[in-house]
Amino acid sequence: MKHDVEKVGDEIVIIRLKGELDHHSTTEIRNEIVPMIKNGSIKVLVWNLKDLNFMDSSGIGLILGRMRELAPIDGQTIIVNPSPTMRKIFQFAGLSPYIYSESEIEIISKLGGIVYGQ
């Protein structure tokens, strides 16, 4: 599992996942993201799943857990580029409202307006 965490602007973080997301890799990603949420340096997580081939239940838990941590600060979770199979998994998990069909660049452009009032 490879991943890339990129901070965009003051409050947006993009997490790009590649390969297979299982319980081993979720711990590493969680340890990287949680401090940023807790210290208030981010308000929006964009999960780009374009290059993700597999996700087990711990991956769903990773996303849901970060959603719960963002909720008290009115944070936002966005999922982009899930495969058709992962889209179905997210639908079963009740995460359909967080899946967007726009590209990462389009989402960031929209978020600029949402986050910064533009």
Image (cartoon, rainbow, N blue to C red):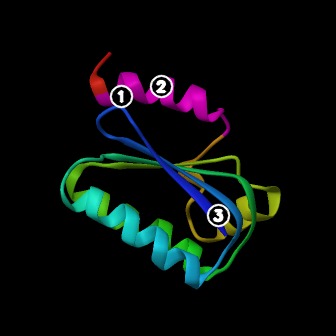
Sequence-wise first label, 3 or 2: 3
Identify the residue shown where x is 66% and y is 33%.
103
- The quadrant the C terminus occupies is top left
Amino acid type shown at disc 3: Lys
- Tag on residue 2? 3
Residue 66 x/y as whole percent: 39, 64
Residue 23 x/y as whole percent: 57, 84
Badge 2 vs badge 1, beta-carbon distance below 8 Å: yes
Q: Which residue is mark 2?
A: 110
Nearer the camera: disc 3 or disc 2 = 3
- The quadrant the N terminus occupies is bottom right
Does residue 21 appear left or right of residue 10 in this picture?
right
Does residue 25 appear left or right of residue 69 in this picture?
right
* Quarter of the view holding residue 12: top left
Amino acid type shown at disc 2: Lys
In the image, residue 27 lies in the stretch drawn in magenta: no
| Secondary element type, mark 2 | helix
| Secondary element type, mark 1 | helix
Comparing 23 with 65, the one in front is 23
Amino acid type shown at disc 1: Ile
In the rendered image, the residue lying farthest to the top is 118
Identify the residue shown where x is 59% and y is 71%.
93
Sequence-wise first label, 1 or 3: 3
Residue count near mark 2 (Cα–Cα under 10 Å), binned few <14, some 14–19, many ≥20: few
Residue count near mark 1 (Cα–Cα under 10 Å), binned few <14, some 14–19, many ≥20: few
Q: Is residue 66 above or below residue 56?
A: above
Q: Which residue is mark 1?
A: 114
User: For the magenta stretch, what is the residue range?
Assistant: 101-115
